Image (cartoon, rainbow, N blue to C red):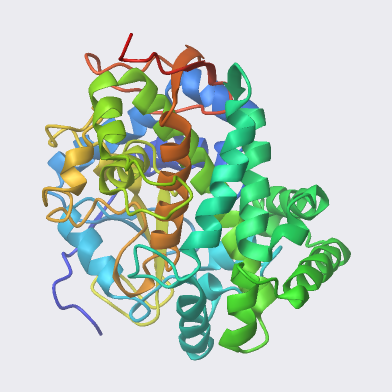
Amino acid sequence: MTSTHLTRPVTASVTETLRVAAEVVLPTLAGGVIKRRPAALGLAGKLQVDRPGVQLLSRLRERYDGRPLKLRVPGRSVELVLSAEDVGTLLTGAPTPFSPSTVEKRAALGHFQPHGLLISDAADRRPRRRFTEAVLEPGRPLHELATPFARAIMDETAVLLGETELTWDAFAVAWWRLVRTVVLGPGARDDETLIDLLGRLRLDANWAYLHPRRKQLRERFHARLASHLGRAEPGSLAAAIASAGGDGTAVDQVAHWLFAFDAAGMVTFRTLALLATHPAALERARTELPDADPAEPQQLGYLRACVLEAVRLWPTTPMILRETTEETAWGPAGTTVLVYTPFFHRDAELPYADRFEPDIWLDGRARANPALVPFSAGPAICPGRDLVQFCTSTMLANLVRGRDFEQVSGPVLAPDRPLPATMDNFHVKFAVRPVPSRHP
């Protein structure tokens, strides 16, 4: 039995378990875990559904001195983590004794990527992780293909800047064109059917084991994706895939990357909203922008920090799940361990909990907190984190370089008031204007 550094759990009452289900689990599921539901997120934004869950877990942490809480779930062993230290222990313990592959993830992601890295067992995980890292290049701020990626970002952003308003729907069209170009090459740029097929499968995946798997639909999606990968267009991840080898599951891995890029688009739009409503941060971001060709890749440290801060404020993965592969102090093998990230990211004990504070990602404060995990952490940390930060920060740089964005609809964001706990990006709209010249 593994027990080193694990805090002994306490058992929740039936009432506490029901409140966790009602105020934490159900609102998260209602919004769509695998594919966000715009109407549900719109309602969640109006009701600010994340705030009660954060407050509930804060009270439970105080009541039980931060010890993990064993929830009373019939037929299941489920633990709820309540301390930052336990979050760190859990995430560094992957893939054993805390596996990223859980019964819930296998049921959900199996709808469109049954052989994906995230739900692979220990034997398959190592080669698939090696393949994924070879293509995505974690640890490199600028991917080997950063130059063609930067040019694609500039081209897609230019289309958006030709308009006088920017909505989520317009942004999403440009974002998906960019994603298809980066991942699959220019030949896939306009293949909206590919993402439509993926979207249908992801909506099924929201229901996990409660929805039957549509094998024919998945095969159509996989065949279409495989045809794009087969071209291995130069300057795309598909070309890197062709030279990386792998175990024959590239289609499943790429399906996951496309899924993850959807969340990255939401983060980019939310970060733009933060910059539009925080003038000092916007000015600092613009100061960082080089005078060189915007198509040349840059690291853009402050804008990357802004992106990370947007994920802290509104996590795109509100629940991190692990499943024990052996008996531990937290329960028998097969125990599900749950981390509710909004609780830790918006912890009232953090002086910056409800404000936009990108500097925490630059001065070491975020690094010192093991529960601030925008891309997870430990051996199972997101292998695409550096590529995502490059794409998001580069698009933001192209957007704000010569345009002002005035938020004209959506939640109220301001530096002098607490930021909302739940962010509905689907109904945000900006008025777009050229940046006034500073010289008469």
Q: Residue furthest front?
A: 440
In the figure, is residue 418 to the left or right of 412?
left
- Foreground residue, 253 or 60? 253
- Foreground residue, 126 or 50? 126
Residue at x 45%, y 77% (from the top left corner): 133
Residue at x 62%, y 63% (from the top left corner): 183
Percent across and percent down for residue 135 are: 51, 76
State which quarter of the image contains the N terminus: bottom left
Relative to 156, residue 385 above or below: below
Residue 37 visible in image? no
The answer to which quarter of the image holds residue 18 is top left
- Foreground residue, 144 or 382? 144
Q: Number of labelled discs?
A: 0
The answer to which quarter of the image holds residue 421 is top left
Percent across and percent down for residue 118 are: 51, 70
- Foreground residue, 405 or 294? 294
Residue at x 15%, y 59% (from the top left corner): 85
Residue 77 visible in image? yes
Residue at x 53%, y 21% (from the top left corner): 428
Percent across and percent down for residue 326 are: 36, 82
Percent across and percent down for residue 45 are: 48, 23
Relative to 145, residue 45 above or below: above
Relative to 244, residue 266 above or below: above
State which quarter of the image contains the C terminus: top left
In the figure, is residue 277 to the left or right of 61?
right
Relative to 313, residue 128 above or below: below
